[in-house]
Image: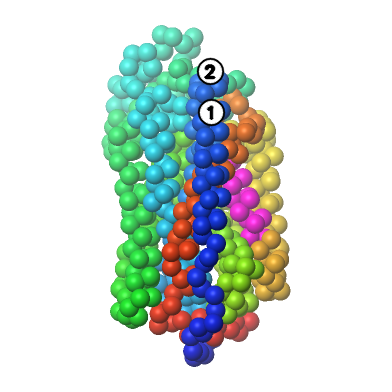
Amino acid sequence: MSHSSDSTTRTDDRTQFAGGGKLFKIGATMAVAGLGLALIMGFGGPTPFRRFLFSYLVALAYFLSLALGSLAFVLLQHLTRSGWSVGVRRVAENIASTLPALGVLAIPIVLSVMMGNGYLYRWAIPENAERSIPGAHEAAAKGEDEVPPAPAAKSAGAPKQIIQEEAVESTDRPENPRDFKLDALTLMKRDFGLHWLNPWFFILRVVVYFLVWSGIAVWYRKQSILQDKTGDANITLAMQARSAPALVALGLTLTFGAFDLLMSLDPHWYSTIFGAYYFAGCAVASYALLTLIVFLLQRSGYLRDSINIEHYHDLGKYMFAFTFFYGYIAFSQYMLLWYANLPETTAWMARHGASTAHPNAFSGVIVTILFCKILVPFAAILSRHVKRARGVLAFWAVWILVFQFVDMYWIVMPELRGVGLSPRPADLACLVGVGGVFLAVLSRKMSAASLRPMADPRLPETLAHVNAY
């Protein structure tokens, strides 16, 4: 609960960011050095660039979660006509406006599918006599599990047998994409029904996702800045009117984007709430980033009158609530997959360390996520006093951001089968490189306009915001 009183807009607050040029240079340097180093390291190994693609996808999914969560925050504030958040909303708009740049960064993922080598998505390999299991099309069309043995294999067996055994076998030896086969189950998802895993349909969907996300983010930021210049209150009404359909569009595209970019790394595996799982991570990480940026801005002398301890309190509430929500979704996904005990899903869980029968290196990662992303921050941010202590809340924001990356690493890297938990320099290089692009674009957006909406009709409300408890 909160209440507000009328207040005049303060004009002595520092709202024009002067550090954009310096941060842009730092971000650009990080981008060139990180991505350049990652590309150089990508040439090594028997399958060049395969490890690079996995490391790159981890970094992209991480920063994409920050931008999408911020976009959801912006839309939610307009939908609910919130007054308390006006002072911090521009920061979220700036974070969300990095989505066009992240769309450009998705090009290597698209190219990997176009090349058809299966380095990242094994279902993207071309259909030919050498790589497909003969008779698999016919078996899939009839809904059968059995397919004729592959000539090059000693014993291809039935797809269900392959699925059941792959969780153990794939962690014992590195894979060679040249040995990948399009089994009946994968072919059914690729060539029958909706042709969902068809490479060109996949590429079309990814393009649509980023166009939708970028279009919404750019439009809302543009309208917000336009209102700074014109003072037209009707702009707020227009943004409110479009927030509901925009949220629906964001929810659908985020869900299917998570399916395509992350869940389809294993074409056999599926989880109906994986979209909600990814969104929960997006939300808690974006609130953490928003809190951290506001804290750093105020430490540098900006927005000291616009944002007070009450705003930190509310941001802390969001961090706490979505930490709980993430834990609920994560447990629900695990419980449902464990209870169903389907070969298509148990193999994925085993590879990701959630198996007592066949524990692996990722078993420690999943326990770390349980404690460090759910239980520890849940207990730490529960107190009202923590939410109202700027420095302490900023520490837990950093904590959440770190383990959001660990979560993305845990989602992606076990699908690089046969390698196990083996962090490489390429992982750090991709994180620094993609993070550099993110920082460079964000710094430009922050310095291009006021750090807070200057003419929003609810600005007096946010300046006088007080929490009742």
**Could you say whether the residue bearing mark 2 is in a helix, strand or loop?**
loop
Amino acid under disc 1: Ile
- Residue 175 screen position, x and y as percent: 53, 21
Q: Is 404 within the magenta?
A: yes
Q: Is 426 within the magenta?
A: no
**Could you say whether the residue bearing mark 1 is in a helix, strand or loop?**
helix
Answer with the quarter of the image where residue 453 lies. Answer: bottom left
Q: Is residue 377 left or right of residue 156?
A: right
Amino acid under disc 2: Pro
Coloured how?
A: rainbow
Q: Check the picture and name the quadrant holding the N terminus.
A: bottom right
Camera-side residue: 418 or 343?
A: 418
Residue receiving disc 2: 46
- What's the magenta bit mostly, secondary-structure-wise? helix
- Residue 298 screen position, x and y as percent: 61, 70
Tell me whether circle 2 and circle 1 mark residues in contact (CB < 8 Å).
no
The stretch in magenta equals 396-412
